[in-house]
Amino acid sequence: MFSSDIGVCINRPFQWHNSETTLEREPANMTATITEPTLSPSLFHRHLMDTVQPAMSYDVGDVGKWQSRLRPKVRELVGFPDGDRIALNPHSLWKRDHEYGTIEKLILSSEPGSDILAYLCLPANATPPYPFFICVQGHTTGMHHSIAVERDDNSIPMQIEGDRDFGLQCMARGIGALCIEQRSFGERRERHQDWISTHPCHDATMQALMLGRPLIGQRIFDVDRGLDYLETRDDVDWSRIGIMGNSGGGTISVFSAALLPRITHAMPSCYFCTFRDSIMSIYHCADNYVPGLLPLAENADVMGLFAPRPVVVVCGKEDPQFPVDGVRRAFADLQKIYRAAGAADRCHLVVGEGGHRFYADDAWPVMMQE
């Protein structure tokens, strides 16, 4: 118990004043209006979004010149590395026949300290050179979904939900596929730290931000290294090189298409949406975020870097993570860019009837026309 001359005593219980107690009158120059305090961080972020417009969003003018200004900025923000590349050193882990063709599991060297696993899928119903798609999964247990096998035993078939068997879909249509295991997913999940986050991407994303190499840029680099591998082959039709993926795979599909000139076709699923309506308003995985991007550009601007090449945007009418209204708003902005590039007929939107998944029966007929 202590007391002092300012009259503090801690052994006396606190007394609530009656609501009718008269308070000391405020000075005349102070407002008596009490408003609800804005304490949630999202309210401040919403204020910033309302007051700061992306400085490099496309408005009017020459699309090519606009792209040449924005693309290097996006490349810098994602931390895409420049300079010499190490040897790929491709090794085959196994090769098997499949009813649609052949599937081979490969390991490639991406950069010092990081190797890539991938499935090379070659169709039986076509002759080389093959068109190819790079296939990237989102937040699933890994690339094994692309060929519908168990992750820990690739000889055991498994049922795949949400049309995520991208590699098999390609093979059935006479298209080759390179199905890449993204960093932090599947067989590239974190297994060496003593204390590992329950979310597969969290540790890698946070560490990558501290190093100035955002995880999103590392994953784009792996896609580019996959393209390097395809260049070592003589059975690839370089006039038709696509990328596809759902959710986190859709993220990498958009950014890879925007930054990698060897990609000619893009089919991102359940990611393309205004940032405001999706990752800036709803809980999302940290690997979707690029520090400093929104003051420069919106999602439509990033995808617009791909114009005039063909894009099929896929979404679900009931997807709560990337709401369809936000998708339509972003797509309207993307259409504006494609019209200005003289390629309005190469920009497509496919809306499935369900939720957060790919819609093969709706999307592929549109892509195959391209």
Image: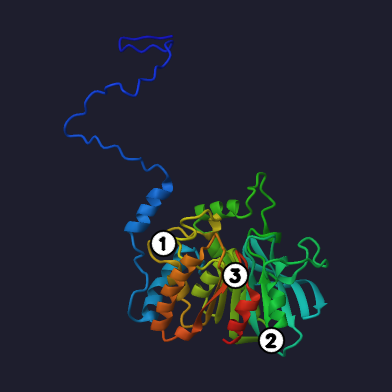
Looking at this view, name the residue that lies furthest to the front: 20
User: In the rendered view, would you say 30 is above or below 56?
Assistant: above
Residue matched to label 3: 353
The image quadrant that residue 10 belongs to is top left
Residue matched to label 1: 294
- Name the residue type under label 3: Glu
Q: Secondary structure at mark 2?
A: loop
Q: Residue at x 46, y 80 (%)?
A: 307
- Name the residue type under label 2: Asp
In the picture provided, is 73 more to the left or to the right than 22?
Answer: right
**Residue 66 x, y percent position in the rendering:** 37, 76
**Residue 114 x, y percent position in the rendering:** 64, 62
In the picture provided, is 276 more to the left or to the right than 21?
Answer: right
The circle on residue 101 is none
Residue 22 visible somewhere in the drawing = yes
Q: Earlier in the sequence, mark 2 or mark 1?
A: 2
Q: Give the number of marks.
A: 3
**Residue 210 x, y percent position in the rendering:** 50, 52
Q: Residue at x 34, y 24 (%)?
A: 19
Report the Cα–Cα distance between label 2 and label 3.
37 Å
Residue 84 visible somewhere in the drawing = no
| Quadrant housing the C terminus | bottom right
Residue matched to label 2: 235
